[in-house]
Every structure is written in structure tokens, then in C-alpha cells.
Amino acid sequence: MDLNQSIRLLSSWIGQIGDLGLNLLWRFIHIVVSLWYIVSGIFEAIESYAISLGLNKKYSSIDLEKLRCLAVVVDIEAVQDVAKVVELLQWLTTIGVKQVGLFDSQGLLKKSKDLILETVPGSMLLEEIGKDFSPDGKRIALEFISSSDNKEAVMKAANILLQRYLKSSHPENDKGENFFTESHLNEALGVVGENVHVPDLLLVYGPIRSHLGFPAWRLRYTEIVHMGTLKYMRYGSLLKAIHKFTGVHQNYGT
Amino acid sequence: MGEKEKRASNRKMPKHVAVILDGNRRWAEKRGLGTSEGHEAGARRLLENAKDCFAMGTNTISLFAFSTENWERPEDEVKCLMALFEKQFRAEMPFFQRDKIKILVIGNRAKIPESLRGLIEEVEEATKSYEGKNLIIAIDYSGRFDILQACKSLATKVKDGLIQVEDINEEAMEKELLTKCSEFPNPDLLIRTSGEQRISNFFLWQSAYTELYFPTVLWPDFGEAEYLEALTWYQQRQRRFGRRV
């Protein structure tokens, strides 16, 4: 073996050892970050328990004036457990939330709509009340939403606008400026049954930290909070999330 | 970040990272500085982080630099931001060409100053042949505007006989969105700094299954360590795209 070959072999070994070392370092970073999240999770669980017991006076009364509409996204795995969804809605009613949009991508909650409405005291369908809903007492208006209310609804609404555009008499160089505006699309979404109730706060229940296809058109300024899995949901965490929202100040980009 | 660190971290890297650069003004206020200095610090951080992202194997980075709503900010601040964009495009052009980064600016260009508009066209033209690294900069962008312009684009194609009404579906829509320019139009990871937990009209259609990460650090302080933490967090996620496991 000549000198060049030896040097190449040595470089290769050094490279492999270096790669191994850095791989181990990356895994170590993962372990540290995971431990950090585990410890944070333990503290959050303790805090949530304390809030549930009423030990923290800050959460004893929450001003819900800013929270006109709350939405809940439930992961597809968790949505089978309707009892947990009912429990969550009962908590929300206790807290005083008046309007809730329930979303799961496959529409399984829509199929359980009757059961949920029967089981949650004071609940009623939002679409049967109309836009000027202002309930008294412990009543809650529910809207059931799925993926068909997202992109599919936008496509149907876009088709309505398209038909209007094609049927109208417009100059050759008109690119649809007067037909495709936000208010036109809002109106067309209403026609296809997408109510466009814009949630102020979106709570995501599940292992994922995305909104899972909640109607995109509604999400412009919505606060999005990940709540963990539905199976291990905590009343204290729910109170904390809503309380935190009431303190948020949005400048809407200005 | 060295070559070897890149290789070590190569498992499960997001192909498309979107960033909402929030916190420049608060960062400046905390230090007793002017708003423009906050935005300049943000601009420097922007390119440093873009370099790190590409070094770690990300194909596309999208930056929400200026929203439609930002036009409502004080006139001086808006002028400062437009001037800053011009300055940064000119200053970083050698970097884009050296590292073969394709630059794409998305948004409604009608209100952008003419000098900046011209410069954007130059930069896009000069980098259009590059592949493998895309830097998408959203200026005067809104998610609702993106959806509406896609609808208009489809309507124009139907009017011109290029497609039939029956051809209009989600796939057709996605091909008309402003992110069609990228091989990976839907972000895997969306980072919004400064602790605000909303997407503020950014990539509304594209973000259905995007992992949302909301660190509390302000954008000018979001450095390599913070980005590594975001990546570590992302790599621990189990992405299902709405399907059962």
C-alpha cells in the first residue's frame, strides 16, 4: 500500500469517526430536548391540576367577551371517543363558551351529531339559530365541520363565482376583478353551506401540531393552541388556554 | 454549521420551511432602538437562517416578509421596509448566485415601488435556472389573496378555452396558487417567532398538515441554536396528513 492510499484510508476512517461522533451529538441533543419537554409537561400537568382545584384565583372568572367563537380540532384517532368530546363540550358550557365549531377531517363528529346534541345539555345546532345567536344561561351553539367544508367548499364557491363571471357581459380584458373579491367568496361560501364563522381561538386535540385541514378561509387571525391528546385532556389546561387567549392583543399586521 | 454537522442531522429534514418573521419592533423597543434598526437586525437574521436551512438539507424556504395588512403601518416604517428589501436584494445577489439559490417573490406587486419591482424581476431572472434551493419571499402577500387570484386565474383559463369548467378541482386550484413555483408547495414546518400563536393569513390553503411551531424568541434573536431546536422538535413529530396510523 503506498502513501497516497494510506492517507486516503486514514481520511476515510477519520471521516467515519467524525460522522459517528456528530450523529451521537445530534441524538444527545434530541434526548436533551425530549427531557425538557417531559419536564415541562409534568409542570403543566401539576399546574393544570391546581387550576382545576381552584387554587389559582386568576382563573376563577374569565371574561369571555373576546371569545365569540371557539373551534375544536380533534385528531382522527381520538374522534372515535365521542364521550370525551361530550365531556369537553360540557366543560366549555361550564366555562361559559357560547359557540363552538367541532372539526375532524373525516366528518365522524358530523355523524355523531344527534348523539352529541342529545347528551350535551343546552346544546343546539348553530345553523338552526342563525347569525344573531345570543343565548342566555348555559346554552351552547354547535357547528359540525369536516374537510368537505374546507377546500371542497372553496372549489364549489369558486365555481359559483366562475359561472357568474362567464354569464356576465364583461370586456375582453376583464380578469375578474369585480367577481372574485373576499366578500364575493364569503357570500358564495354561504350559498354552498359553508357558514364562514371565523373562530377567535382554535384548540387542537391530538398528537399533531397542525390544524389538520380546518377550513382555511376562516383561519386568518385565529389563535391556534395545541392541547395534547383528547384522552388525557385536562380542565385546568382548557381554562388556562382560554384565559391566555383573553389576554392576547392582536395588531392585525398594522 | 460545518459539512459534517449537516450530514449528522440529515434524517427527516423538512423539505419546505415557512417562517413568519415576527418581533422586529419589539426587539428594537427592548433595546431602546428605532423600528428601522429592528427591521435591519431582522433582515440580517433572515439571510443567516436561510443559509443554515439550506445547509441542513431543506429545499424550499418561504419567508413572510410583508403582509397585505402591513400597508396600514406608519408610512415611514413602510418606506423603510421597502428600502430595506431593495438594499438586501442588491447586497445578497452575489450570495444567491454563488450558492445557486432560486429567488421567487410572491404577492400582489401592484403597490410595490417601481424600483423594487424592477429589482425583483432582475433577481428572479438572474436566478431562475437554479434548482435544488428555493427562497420564496412573500411581499404584499395574503392567504386569501392567494386563493382569490387562483380562482381568477382559473376563470381566465376557462374564458380563454384553455380548460373546461369540469376540470376545476383542488388539484387545478393548487396549480394556480402562488406557491406553484416550488417543487414542495406545502410547508412541512411553519415557524412563527415572538410567541404569537396564529398564522396571520399566511399560506392558509397550503398549511393543512403543516407542523406549527411557535417559539417565544423574537425574530432577530432566532439563531442557529433556536433553529436546531425547531428541527429537533419537528423530527419528533409523527406526521399523518389526516390519515390513521
Image (spheres, rainbow, N blue to C red):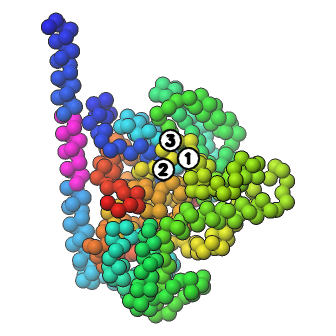
Question: Furthest-top residue in view?
Answer: A2
Q: Name the chain letter of the residue that bears numbered label 2.
A: B
- Secondary element at image label 1: helix
Labels 1 and 2 touching (C-beta < 8 A): yes
Q: Which residue is mark 3?
A: B183
- Give the quadrant of residue A130: bottom right
Residue with the mark numbered 1: B179
Q: Are marks 3 and 2 on the same chain?
A: yes
User: Can residue B98 be seen in the rendering of this structure?
Assistant: yes
Tell me: residue A195, above or below residue A32.
Answer: below
Going from N to C along the chain, the mark reached first, 1 or 2, is 1
Q: CA distance from mark 3 to mark 1?
A: 9 Å
| Nearer to us in this view, B108 or A121 | A121
Image quadrant occupied by the N terminus of chain A = top left
Task: Tell which tag, 3 or 1, sits nearer the viewer.
Answer: 3
Q: Residues within 10 Å of mark 3 (few under 14, many from 20)?
A: some
Pointer 3 chain: B
Mark 1 residue type: Thr
